[in-house]
Image (tube, grey):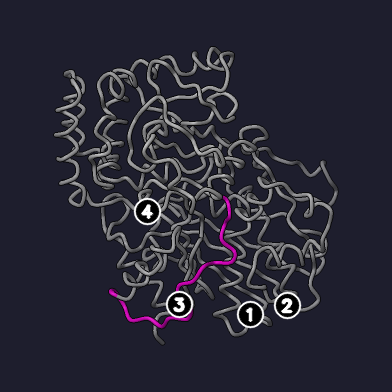
Amino acid sequence: MGRRKKNSKKFSDNQKICENKISEKLNSNKKEEKTEKREEDSSILKDTITVYQRLKLSLVSSMQHRSPDDSDEEEDAAVLNFWPRFVFVSNLCLICMERSEEVCESCGMVSYCTVKHKKQGWQKHRELCQVLTDVCTNGKGLSFLPDLTADDYRVYRLKLIEIVECRLKRLLEPWEKEILLYPRVCCSCRYFSKVLKYCPTCGIELFCENHDDKHEEWCRDFQVFRRVLFMQHKNGHVDPEIPDTFQNSPLYLPDNFDLLMVQLYNRSTYYCDMDCYTYCSLSHISTIPLTTLYSMQISCRDWKTIDTFVIHVIGAEFQFECINLHVWEKFFLHLLPNLKHLRLMFIGPELRLPAVPLDLLTTVKLCSTCKSFGRRVNISFHPGKFYHNFCRSKQFIKPHLVCLFNPGLYRETGFEGRDTWPETIKEFCKTKVPVCVTSYTKHEIPREMIRIKSIIDVETILEPKRNPFASIKPDRNFVSDDAVPLIYKNYYFAIIRGKL
């Protein structure tokens, strides 16, 4: 789920501080002054959260229509082909994503593993290099980063993006923004230098001569992060084989993702030989349905016998909650033999659907066994709608479970600068059904609960805890990177219900 936009008042002080420091350090031309003037209304400076969400794994997709002639048993279905975008890491080669000690002599912010790759990457980097050199290196735009507070540091990096875009007279691509969002500086003190050392184990984090091993807690996570990026860059999108096991009786999920996979794959060669990238991707596309099923089994007494189950996903984003809908069949219809009809309703103001026929998006191809037993998965999308408005519409069907995945409720903000959360919180609590709320970090989930309870009286079904079915695919954290450099989808969760 997308994080909501922050109120500009919360950042006004930080913006003023950073703007003053920038004007002192950088020689801004008239075009930049015009940019600074309109930055008061800039969504980037109002909201670090929006920029962070924009830089999550973006996928370039193409959609093909499979005709009935392809298979006598298959219905028309949408086939989404994804290729992950390039992700920039300051210490990995711009061409091949291998570790690199060679940096661009001019800007000092981009790395290459060989002279050959440096020549090859110059065409890709040349235009931006000159501006980065003028603003960040020669202009000393990165020289005083150690003096900034964590909040000032975040706002300042966004300010630099605005200045660079103004100089280039174009918007930066996501990977180009990452050069400034995650710059080549010491991870401990933020000192900028062309001769920083990198961690020999993870190959990601950089250190100055005064800080050489301060990230032991996160080193293993960064190792996985680097491996995933390398495999992703080399092989593109991976589509893990989802375990296809029918249960004769309802399967109660073990409190461990790996134990469940071992059980469902039945120790198959495919599972035993699975590489790191595939395994991370498996957890990533499974976290939504498995977190939902786990919450269902904790909070719904009749989960074993119910034949129709309706789920509302609030604040859904297509590229996370909605692109692997076929997985729901495997984890719901195949594991719960009494369940005949699963209905999924995705609602959210930030839900944007691809420009293809809606019936292709809502069609979930079912196996022949599910078809023969009359089972079905119904999908409906409700884009551009707040949940409290959806609840008053004709499309509303009372749910058995409501889910909010990584919503950021504790941020007292709303979509497009309005605080719409109180209305939504009241509305989903009025349903008197279990509500699952997840978060990216351990520190966020208690704050989510505090926000809900400050608005309406609720019953806590499950206190905040580590989610055994969280994604184990790491991603960089911009919003609170001073405390937690890497985050995971649905890392912690809790279940509440409006008091009956």
Which secondary structure lies at badge 4? loop
Q: Position of residue 403 (x, y in %)?
A: 49, 66
Q: In the figure, is residue 487 to the left or right of 120?
A: left
Q: Residues within 10 Å of mark 3 (few under 14, many from 20)?
A: few
Question: Which residue matches tag 2?
Answer: 250
Residue at position x 79%, y 54% in the image: 272
What's under tag 4, amino acid-wise? Ala
Q: Earlier in the sequence, mark 4 or mark 3?
A: 3
**What's the distance in space between the residues labelled 2 and 3, CA to CA?**
25 Å
Q: Residue at x 56, y 61 (%)?
A: 470
Q: How far separated are the C-alphas under marks 1 and 2?
A: 9 Å
Q: Position of residue 468 (x, y in %)?
A: 58, 66
Q: Earlier in the sequence, mark 2 or mark 3?
A: 2
Q: Spatial distance from mark 4 to mark 2, Cα to Cα? A: 41 Å
Q: Which residue is mark 1?
A: 303
Write down the region rendered in magenta: 454-473
Q: Of helix, strand and loop, which one carries label 3?
A: strand
**Residue 467 forms part of the magenta stretch:** yes
